Image (cartoon, rainbow, N blue to C red):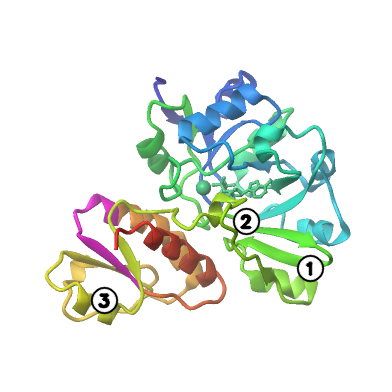
Amino acid sequence: MYNTEIGIDIDKAVALLNANEVVAIPTETVYGLAGNALKNEAVIKIFEAKKRPFFNPLILHLASVELIEKFAWVDEISLLLAQHFMPGPFTLLLNKKDIVPDLVTAGSAKVAIRIPNHSLTNQLLTQLKFPLAAPSANPFGYVSPVSAKHVQQGLQGKIPYILDGGNCNIGLESTIVEVENDNVILHRAGGLAIEEIEAIISKKIIVATHHSKPQTSGQLKSHYATTTDLLQGNVDELIKKHQGKNIAILSFKKQYDNVETQNQFILSPSENLNEAAQNLFATMRKLDEINYDIILAEVFPNKGLGLAINDRLQRAQASAKE
Ligand code: TXA
Ligand code: MG
């Protein structure tokens, strides 16, 4: 057991990481649970704190684009994408070099690489002599944390330190892609809209089909789940179907009749998908703290960050008992 502290002391974070301890770090997407990616002792602590299965690989977080080639082989299109979107909410799957431990990639020949965009964490990364392996800082399967307090709620006593960088301003995990035969394959919709990537490559992204044995936990059907059952669909119809229950509604901006206003949670009054993304996980957590029987969520427009919002709601729904 640790006495989990929260603070903004970068030197303390550096000292802990140098001692193969894990530290929760802020990023613009969600908080990560970081450790020295090159030391198995540290990486094992990440898996243990999260209760994450070892077959699930971790993203390598670096300080700059120039460092990528130390850890992976970079093709031309991947380099172009890295130059455009890093630092940012964007992760590239690349063929790994030997220096990356198999524990980080779960035995895969590919490594996921990302350069976060958060001043505290970027300062931290530049002070370290090694990259950070970091999954989202939540117990496995639960909603990702977008504030230091969320991290504390899930990992209190399991880690020594949480570097507090405030609320994450994107609020959804990074978009994960891989370049294969000059095509860009989407492995996880996330905080970078695919339209932005398509504009750079001048062609459509190919959405990866999910296999029964997932390579990415973002591909596990049931994930990012609230404890309270959540259903996504036509909310008017769902309200009728679940009459008599204590219902919460998660909507873009619409108000519904027949459900008290205080039980309706609007993600963006101005119908802005970026704002909705930013509010999604914090609202899911808030709803989980209230004793609702069921959460009914709208289907968001399937464009921009709406794609990732719908993806997370679908996965939360996959955990519902009905
Ligand atoms: O925004 C983010 O990506 C956050 C912040 C902390 O950087 N990280 C994050 O990590 O969401 P995690 O572990 O919760 O999700 C990363 C996803 C997982 O689904 C994992 O399976 C996949 O990336 N992944 C990591 N390495 C991989 C690899 N070598 N091959 C395939 N998938 C990989
Ligand atoms: Mg995660």
Residue receiving disc 1: 183
Residue at the front extreme of this rendering: 212
Dot 1 or dot 3, earlier in sequence = 1
Inspect the image, locate mark 2, and give the three-letter code of the amino acid beneath it: Pro
The residue shown at (43%, 77%) is 271
Secondary element under disc 3, as helix, strand or loop, is helix
The residue shown at (53%, 58%) is 170
> Which residues are drawn in magenta?
287-297
Which image quarter holds the C terminus?
bottom left
Residue 130 picture location, percent across and down: 72, 30
Numbered tag placed on residue 89 in the rendering: 2
Looking at the image, do the residues carrying marks 1 and 3 touch, with CB atoms under 8 Å apart?
Answer: no
Residue receiving disc 3: 238
Inspect the image, locate mark 3, and give the three-letter code of the amino acid beneath it: Leu
In magenta segment, residue 132 = no
Residue 216 picture location, percent across and down: 60, 51
Residue at the right extreme of this rendering: 76
